[in-house]
Image (cartoon, rainbow, N blue to C red):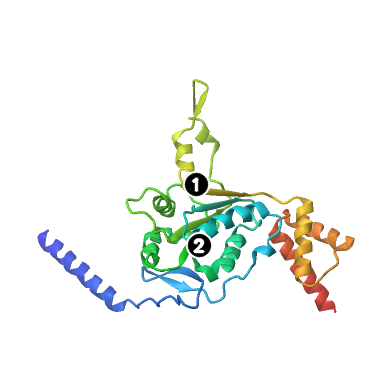
Amino acid sequence: MDKLEQLCNQAEKLLERLECLLRTDAPEPDWQNSIAFRWRKQDNHGYLESIKHPHRILLDELCCIEQQIKRIERNTRQFVQGFSANNVLLTGARGTGKSSLIKALLNKYASNGLRLIEVEKHHLVDLHDIVEIIHKRPERFILFCDDLSFESDEPGYKALKVVLDGSLTTISENVLIYATSNRRHMIPEYMRDNLTTRHSGGEIHPSEAIEEKISLSERFGLWISFYPFDQEQYLSIVRHWLIYFGIAAMTPEITQESLQWALERGSRSGRVAWQFARDFAGRQKSVD
């Protein structure tokens, strides 16, 4: 048994040496010329990849979410200026501008030192490694986690909880986490979770299952909710994007066509309005 153990130890050391020999050094991020980065993994080693062509959307191009813009921009401005600010969770209806808003904030405050790092859900377990790379940088970093949805036992879910609040080491002061999700608590909620809720002395005491499910979202200091657009708002967004594409007049025929477009897709979201305007403008110009 001792000989087998010795052979295993030797094999493990040999594998470690081979890994070091085969490992390719990750490229250094282009700190001077890039404002956005993406966390990548190669051979189990992570690195920051510069995004050469980030989305250049502007805040003025986002319609019907003025209150949401006001709240998150104030928080971001505090952060960029070196004052205290909160991690942010943006939740609500799909296609209402949650991700676009974060990208627009980057474009507005990049000249003031704001930078964005996109982190995919399955890489959330590397958050501490990412922070270790950037914590001494002079820039201010938003770790951007888009469209999050978990099962409660996923490693990324627990890793994000620990980084937000609960680790022995605090997150760096030049880092915030902005996350988007269609769910307020980011994990499925079932009717059975309410069956063990207790009522005592007129008070409601949620079950442990419910407490666990809200424990992640409550770690975000700022919650910003997005709601489905009504017909008037949808048409306003269509009108905005038609002007953007060079079509000034919103005729009754265009209005009817845009409503039919939304009906076919079962949504009056900002994304659907953009898609209609893009399609309509393209068809008009191809005819001309």
Which residue occupies 43% across, 58% down?
Answer: 124
> Looking at the picture, does residue 269 appear above or below residue 139?
above
Would you say the residues marked 1 and 2 are in contact, meaning their CB atoms lie under 8 Å apart? no
Which residue occupies 60% across, 70% down?
Answer: 55
User: Residue 69 placed where, x, y %?
Assistant: 63, 56
User: Residue 35 placed where, x, y %?
Assistant: 51, 72
Q: Amino acid at mark 1?
A: Ser
Q: Would residue 185 be seen by someone viewing this image from the given angle?
A: yes
User: Residue 183 placed where, x, y %?
Assistant: 57, 48
Q: Nearer the viewer, residue 164 or 205?
A: 164
Which residue occupies 57% across, 55% down?
Answer: 74
Q: Amino acid at mark 2?
A: Val
Q: Which residue is mark 1?
A: 217
User: Residue 187 placed where, x, y %?
Assistant: 51, 47
Name the image quarter holding the N terminus: bottom left
Name the image quarter holding the C terminus: bottom right
* Eye-nearest disc, 1 or 2: 2
Q: Is residue 135 left or right of residue 278?
A: left
The dot on residue 80 is 2
Give SS at disc 1.
helix
Which residue occupies 32% across, 51% down?
Answer: 168
Locate residue 8: give its quadrant. bottom left
